[in-house]
Amino acid sequence: METSTFKLLTLNIAHARGPILHQGLVKQKTILKWLDKIATLLIDLDPDIVALQEIDEDSRWNGHLDLLEYLREKTGIAFSAYGMHNRHDGKFRLNYGNAFLSKHPIIQDEVVAFDKKKIGSKGFLYCRCDTPLGLLDFINVHLDFKSKKGRLIQCHKIKKFVLNKEIEYDIYNPMTPFVMGDFNAQMKSQPDAARFLLEEVSAHSHYRSYPVKAATYPSYLPRKAIDYIFVPEAYHVSHSEVIRRKVSDHNAVLVEIQPTSKEQN
């Protein structure tokens, strides 16, 4: 098996508004400028899998740009999947959510919205990729920013989904997903969402979370870590880093992994 480093990256792109307060205050040419900065970041870092949050498929506030397709064309990353958990059609269209970009074929994907609200809903996107490390599962999450109780309820839904997917794949050889995204909660805050979900999934299959200490938000003066990548124990992390390049109001998290010797066999 090929054992070269495999890179994961998560970034809340904030609708490609940069550090500006709200995307509704930004002209389309400014959105395109920040999209180009994000694309340059992805080209420079060359990740295998990219999890993006707050990405628009078709929204009035940016002139109905398809942000994922724009990034895919700019970066040359071959495969993509949208997870629209916020859909509001009509005169003021707002269709956005999570997305994956992948250098490797996406053979299955599924989106789960946490509620049925037309505006402001959060959710997660699941995908299975055929990679040089074999079939890998990924979950891209964006949790509620207002309510700790709401985030914990959302975590229970993620945990249930993960367990169902593992059983569906092979109860004797479970598929353990990487979990990544914007948790809107700090790991040190107990029992808030980040630590709660890490402990819940680790009770079934041990995980480690990254970044360990560095802050991710806000990008212009990082004060807290709310963006994470959870890595299953079957993979060795050779490098992790919070990327200090201002392309959003969040900083990106990069993790480089290799399978353990057991996994390689």
Image (cartoon, rainbow, N blue to C red):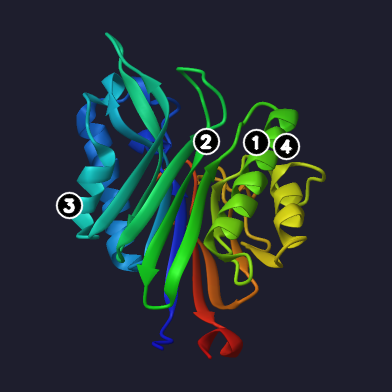
Q: Position of residue 109 (x, y in %)?
A: 40, 49
Decide if residue 213 is in sight here: yes
Please tell me which of labels 1 and 3 falls first in the chain.
Answer: 3
Query: For mark 1, does the 10 Å Cα neighbourhood hold few (<14), some (14 to 19), or many (20 or more) residues?
Result: many
Which residue lies under the disc numbered 1? 154
- The alpha-carbon separation of the residues under discs 3 and 4 comes to 37 Å
Query: For mark 2, does the 10 Å Cα neighbourhood hold few (<14), some (14 to 19), or many (20 or more) residues?
Result: many
Amino acid found under the numbered disc labelled 2: Gly
Quadrant location of residue 141? top right
Residue at point 58%, 90% (across, down)? 261
Q: Position of residue 211 (x, y in %)?
A: 61, 62
Amino acid found under the numbered disc labelled 3: Glu
Quadrant location of residue 198? bottom right
- The alpha-carbon separation of the residues under discs 1 and 3 comes to 33 Å
Q: Nearer the viewer, mark 3 or mark 2?
A: 2
Q: Is residue 79 above or below residue 66?
A: below
Q: Position of residue 25 (x, y in %)?
A: 35, 21
Q: Is residue 64 left or right of residue 202?
A: left
Which residue lies under the disc numbered 4? 152
- The alpha-carbon separation of the residues under discs 1 and 2 comes to 8 Å
Residue at point 73%, 32% (across, down)? 148
Mark 4 secondary-structure assignment: helix
| Image quarter hosting the N terminus | bottom left
Q: Can you tell which mark lies on residue 73? A: 3
Amino acid found under the numbered disc labelled 1: Gln
Q: Is the residue under label 2 in contact with that under label 4 (CB below 8 Å)?
A: no
